[in-house]
Amino acid sequence: MAKKLSILGSTGSIGKQTLDVVAAHPEQFQVTALAAGSQIEVLSKQIEKFRPSLVSVATAELAKEVQARFGHALQVEYGESGLQQVASAADAELVVTAVVGTLGLRPTMAAVLAGKEIALANKETLVAAGHLITDLARRKGVRILPVDSEHSAIFQCIHGESCKQVARILLTASGGAFRDKTRDEMQQASLADALAHPNWSMGAKITIDSATLMNKGLEVIEAHWLFDLPYEQIEVLIHPQSIVHSLVEFQDRSVLAQLGTPDMRIPIQYALAYPERLEANWPRLDLLSVGTLTFNKPDLTRFPILGLAFQAGKAGGSVPAVLNAANEMAVSLFLDGKIGFLDIERTLVSVLEQHAPVSHPSLDEILALDQWARETAKREIAG
Ligand code: NDP
Ligand code: MG
């Protein structure tokens, strides 16, 4: 029987690659519901090809247009409630969360509450509300399967062993577009420079997060929640080749790593098919052509945001949610050409300084603080 999938963010980078995996395994997977934002041309092609029974788009106008194209055999919803309906679609067994940012928070909670297995790409939701999501998932007996390549690597290395036997995890990072740049060069950097990721092709927001190393900071917090490990046991290594996707050191000093080409279809397929491994015909890893694998310590002086994220993670409570929301706003202003690259970190520092932490925030408190952090970031930048 084919596993039935709901995909949140089907028109994005992860969403499209998820559908590549589905198309490569039509007997294994069936698409039951899709949610997109505003790219309805792309969504329409996906509807024709994968025949979901429910879709959602960003607005009522877009929904009307999609409905007119496909008639009433297709249920078309929109907005936050549409996303939540796709996340909890009655016949979906696994929900792929591939929207960007805390937009994914309520739908992810809705999916877990409805008892759906989660293939989690949308790391910002775990950063903002890791305590709520992991607690609910435990109570519901729902598995959260990582899509992020580093976390998939760790998950594959830990497979079958208790997290208690893990001494530390080593998260690898490509180093992003500015890996070898000075602070002066970063100060002058253009949007195009920041979007030129050396190894991965991804959505705009995560590509900027890779250039600031915020992406790795978010991933440290994501790893803390996914693997229930204290921050003292999580380390980051710069690995420019992006071949070793992460490593796990066990108590006996044995170290396991997972390797592969920088191709998101591999971790996506692993999450979709778990606990099986399906055949794939993507390009093989050719270590002879890679030649050398190198590892360096991250430079926190050039990339202070990584240090900030570790601090926010350790502080816990509402602090990671505030850091994440301020970052979403700052990155969006950078993408709009309103601020320079180094203004992103200045904004984060300033918003965190103004935040009075809450130790066990509820979902509503997190969403209110998310809003507050965005407004404060915007004010900071306007000032
Ligand atoms: P993209 O920007 O490529 O895609 C975002 C998706 O969200 C699109 O389908 C977009 O729709 C949809 N969306 C935007 N606004 C709305 C809305 N209001 N309602 C419903 N859907 C909306 O992002 P990525 O695929 O790069 O990233 C997705 C998540 O996965 C992020 O959390 C990222 O950190 C994570 N991730 C991504 C990786 C990658 O390789 N890209 C790797 C590891 C993690 P539309 O385009 O139609 O407007
Ligand atoms: Mg990653």
Image (spheres, rainbow, N blue to C red):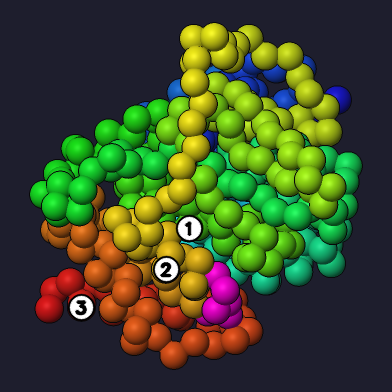
**Residue bearing mark 1:** 217
Circle on res. 21: none
- Crowdedness near tag 2: few (<14), some (14–19) or many (≥20) residues, C-alpha within 10 Å: many
- The type of residue carrying mark 1 is Gly
Circle on res. 308: 2
Residue 99, image x, y percentages: 49, 48
Q: Look at the numbered disc 3 and give the secondary structure of its residue.
A: helix
Q: Of all residues shown, which one is farthest toward the bottom?
A: 356
Q: Quadrant of residue 25?
A: top right
| Mark 2 / mark 1, whichever is N-terminal | 1
The residue positioned 44% from the left and 90% from the top of the image is 356
The residue positioned 73% from the left and 26% from the top of the image is 29
Residue 241, image x, y percentages: 46, 28
Query: Up-down: is 268 above or below 114?
Result: above
Q: Nearer the viewer, residue 117 or 190?
A: 190
Residue 327 falls left or right of residue 135: left
Q: Is residue 337 visible?
A: no
Quadrant where the C terminus lies? bottom left
Residue 231, image x, y percentages: 62, 65
User: What distance separates the C-alpha of mark 2 from that of mark 1?
Assistant: 8 Å
User: What distance separates the C-alpha of mark 1 from that of mark 3?
Assistant: 24 Å
Q: Nearer the viewer, residue 96 or 322?
A: 322
The residue positioned 84% from the left and 58% from the top of the image is 164
The residue positioned 33% from the left and 46% from the top of the image is 211
- Magenta stretch, residue numbers: 313-318
Q: Of all residues shown, which one is farthest toward the front?
A: 253
Q: Is residue 224 visible?
A: yes
- Crowdedness near tag 3: few (<14), some (14–19) or many (≥20) residues, C-alpha within 10 Å: few
Residue 122, image x, y percentages: 54, 50
Q: Quadrant of residue 109?
A: bottom right
- The type of residue carrying mark 2 is Leu
**Residue bearing mark 3:** 379
